[in-house]
Image (cartoon, rainbow, N blue to C red):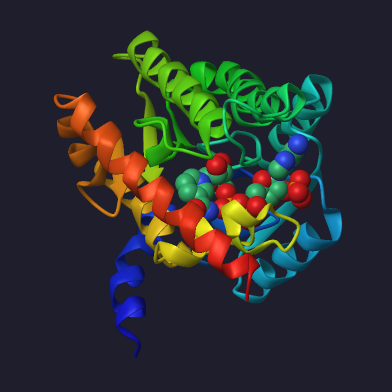
Amino acid sequence: MATEDVILRPLRSFFRGRTLLVTGASSGIGYDIALVLGGLGAKAALLARRQPLLDNLASAIRDEGGSALVLAADITEREAVLDAVKRALSDFGHIDILVNSAGIVRPGAVETMDPQEARRMFEVNVLGTLHAIQAVLPSMRQAGSGNIVNIGSLAGRRGVPALGGYSGSKFALVGLTEALRVELFGSRIHVALVMPGVVDTPMLRSDGRPEHHRLFSDMIPAMPVRWVTWAVIAALTLGLTEVDVPPGAAVLEKLAAFFPGLSDAALAMGNRLWEWAAGRRRHV
Ligand SMILES: NC(=O)c1ccc[n+]([C@@H]2O[C@H](COP(=O)([O-])OP(=O)(O)OC[C@H]3O[C@@H](n4cnc5c(N)ncnc54)[C@H](OP(=O)(O)O)[C@@H]3O)[C@@H](O)[C@H]2O)c1
């Protein structure tokens, strides 16, 4: 029996029969979370725009003996999200767990970034997440319990070059999540942040990305997506409010905040190194 099976087995009793809504379920982190939790017996509602990918995931979950509901919707369209959640509620009766993973990245220097791209990141990463939270919360309030996990980013604790707009959107998401956690204090609705570093998903691999971003993902070793799924499982089962992936990474970010000049200098040097390497690549 695989080691992972030995660890996952006791979790089945925790997740069996629980209802789950995952945004961004068609790809990467959201896909893996839905697949694993669906396989552990949760009833999974899958939200994203690309229906064929959601259909494939739903089949994979059903093959594992789980049940899945496909909700094709654009997270930035509030009415579509409200309708999707209504469907999930009418099929499942209630939603125990909301995992917000839908997100996009549009790399670019702050000095030259296209404001429309920055706007789009805020629409998906912040307002889209807000739509899902507001759609689900009334039923969680009524039930008197629930779990919301937002997938943030280490770039939401420290601004990094070439990801300024993305960092801004993830800082906003962190602020929104922390405020919600306080608003819901004592309500038995638990809110958690999962903060990954660089993760090996299609977000990093897409050929359509500008060269700087591809280089970024080439030079920093990307973590397997399953590490993030484990972090979500830890947040849900242990009631953790914030989980960094890898563990402790945000502590370094927080320490770096005591020495902003020093951490700026280190990041600036790293950025120049990337630009230098990008220049060399262009000439080979
Ligand atoms: N990969 C990393 O290194 C990394 C690191 C830290 C944090 N994160 C965060 O982790 C989350 C998942 O990222 P990922 O790496 O798994 O990326 P991914 O593989 O590109 O998946 C992104 C997901 O978001 C969905 N999405 C995007 N725009 C949407 C919209 N308008 N409406 C509904 N769904 C939408 C996509 O589905 P459709 O295109 O089908 O709509 C897809 O399912 C994001 O919030 C990202 O910021 C990623």
Q: Image point 20% across, 47% down: which residue?
A: 248
Residue 121 position, x and y percent, is 66, 30
- Horizontal and vertical percent for residue 149? 45, 36
Q: Position of residue 218 (x, y in %)?
A: 50, 66
Q: Residue furthest top?
A: 183
> Would you identify the image quadrant in which residue 246 lies?
bottom left
65 displayed left or right of 68: left
Residue at point 43%, 67% (across, down): 224
Camera-nearest residue between 216 and 134: 216
Residue with the most extreme bottom position: 1
Q: Is residue 241 visible?
A: no
Residue in front for this viewpoint, 257 or 182:
257
Residue at (19%, 40%) from the top-left corner? Answer: 252
Give left or right: position of 42 versus 74: left
The N terminus: image quadrant? bottom left
- 174 horizontally vs 205: left or right: left
- Give the answer, above or below, for where 194 lies relative to 167: below
